[in-house]
Amino acid sequence: MLLAEESGGLTIVDGIVVGIYLAAMLVMGFVIARRNTSTDDFFVGGRNLPSWAVGISLIASLLSTITYLGMPGEMFRTGVGFLTRQLGLPIVLLVVWFVWIPFFMRLRLTSAYEYLERRFNYATRALAAIFCICLLLGWIAVVVLTASGAMAEIANMRLGWFFSRDPADADMHVLILGIGLFSIVYTTLGGLRAVVWTDVVQFFVLLTGAVFTMAAVAVETGTGLGDWLSFSHGYKHEQVEWFSWDVSNRSTVFFISIGMLFWHACTHGANQVALQRYFAVKDVWAARRSFLVNAVSSIGLGILLAGVGVSLMYFVLGSDQATGEMLQTRTELLPEFEGATPEAVAELKKKRTEAQDNVFPQFIRVYLPSGLRGLVVAALFAAAMSTIDSGANSISTIVTVDFVRPLRKASLTKRGELLLARILTASMGIIVVAATIWLHHLSKGVDIITLCQRGFNCFLGPLGALFVLAMFSRRATPRTVIPALLAGETVGVGLSYSRELSTLLLSLDEPFLFSTHLVIPAAWLATMSTSLILSIVLGEVAEAEQRQWMWHPVVRGNPGGVPDSAAAALVET
């Protein structure tokens, strides 16, 4: 029998596989560290990294372990209908290709928020930088916490003690520290160049894990893709709803597509993690190739994980291979609603959703053979480590470029600034590890993960709107955009926590619910509207020197035509 026995968990062979992978990441960090002689190398890889590697790094960084594990479950819910959430991507492609990349690559930036001081003032730059740091810290902590939880379930180590006598806590401590510290070491040594090249390796480890999962199902069941697709076609998926006026509905194709459109557009136009990748290549066309590689890789990985989903669907529901706890999962995937009360139906649907999300981790833990299981667990480590290394490097960049350089009276030498950047990177990583362990203990009895996830997403919409206002609104000034940024964040927080706030503050019998897919668009719209209204009320119009930093003068104009103080920041495309 190819598949593992029912006991599950990691074996010595699995541990060796994971250990080899982690050691390889450290070796890469040490080797690459020798090439870093300045913060330009450390933060943007000398601006000469291969565009294909940068594109793969971008998808590896933005893909979380939970997405990797959860996407196959979407095939149980909606089948190929889950691909409809990508309907907004052609618009994203046009925006990033023709608007964001030509503009940002015209400016020789290290931090995206340097631009905001040129267009507005330092206060705007600093506030946007703080927003991004909050976004990244929340994103990293939640991703690592959820990823560690999933891997603890798969690894099933059951340690006797590791800063806790509770085996579950001990396992989580080991995994959080392992993911965090290994990422911190190679990122602190090698900077963005190490992040990019380790991300490339990690991406292909993710692909290999998915391919071997499908291969294991194919060999064990004697079936192939055609059989899986045929079975999926006959399976009764949840109905896909295309449109609804109900803003609490989280499952309509329209709301999901709008949410994904704004997430991608704001991420590639305002998030330091994404923009820093583009700054690491030499010119506009290299950045465009990076984005194209990122888009193609994202679609390819999505299709591959869909394949994992249909293979697991066949294994669990269409074959006789499922045993033990997977039989219980099968029961939860096929609930009987007839005659059940509304409360019982809601509980059955909740269990079905949980079962759909847990199929892939459960299959890895129980059924994959030793060695292969270790490879897939290494893939899960890869996804989590990509999040930490990217976030820590970007936060270090923001702190150094947006706060240390402008506020420090005496300038540092190249060697001194590089040392500071490494200290900041290590510090950010340690803070994230400590915060993640704290969140783990805080989350007992409270759904802290969902609460935090809703919180950090609030920052992205206002940041995206701020850059749009800076590029395209002649009426946008510091007096309008700073209040607008705060107003957009307030709207984002209020809508993200509408259930809790409507119950606590308004004492409503029925809490007000708002689709999480619409939070970023709503916060973006609130920021835009507030700025435009304030500009009319206050009669604000940007000064001529500030207008030189809008999109058309920067992209279409002659770099020599901008103010002398700014000319050095522009490069010929």
Image (spheres, rainbow, N blue to C red):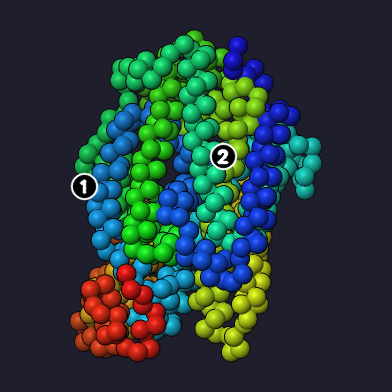
> How far separated are the C-alphas under marks 1 and 2?
38 Å
Q: Position of residue 227 (x, y in %)?
A: 37, 15
Q: Residues within 10 Å of mark 1 (few under 14, many from 20)?
A: few
Q: Which residue is identified by label 2?
A: 380
* Secondary element type, mark 2: helix
Q: Quadrant of the N terminus?
A: top right
Q: Which mark is residue 432?
A: none
Q: Left or right of 114: which side holds 367?
A: right
Does residue 199 sit above or below 429 in this rendering? above
Q: Is residue 319 left or right of residue 269?
A: right
Q: Amino acid at mark 2?
A: Leu
The secondary element bearing badge 1 is classed as: loop
Q: Is 203 positioned to the left or the right of 495 in the image? A: right
Picture coordinates of residue 444, whole percent (x, y): 62, 46
Query: Crowding near pointer 2: few (<14 within 10 Å), some, many (20+)?
Result: many
| Between 229 and 570, the one nearer to me in the picture | 570
Work out whether 358 lies above or below 498.
above
* Position in image of residue 492 (x %, y %): 37, 61
Looking at the picture, tell me which residue is in the foreground, 27 or 537: 27
**Image quarter in which the C terminus is found:** bottom left
Circles 1, 2 touching at the beta carbon (< 8 Å)? no
Q: Which residue carries the number 1 mark?
A: 245
Upstream in sequence: badge 1 or badge 2:
1
Q: Disc count in the image?
A: 2
Image position, residue 438 (x, y; %): 65, 55
Tell me the mark number nearer the camera, choosing from 1 and 2.
Answer: 2
**Residue at the spot 33% in from the left edge and 59% down from the top edge:** 285
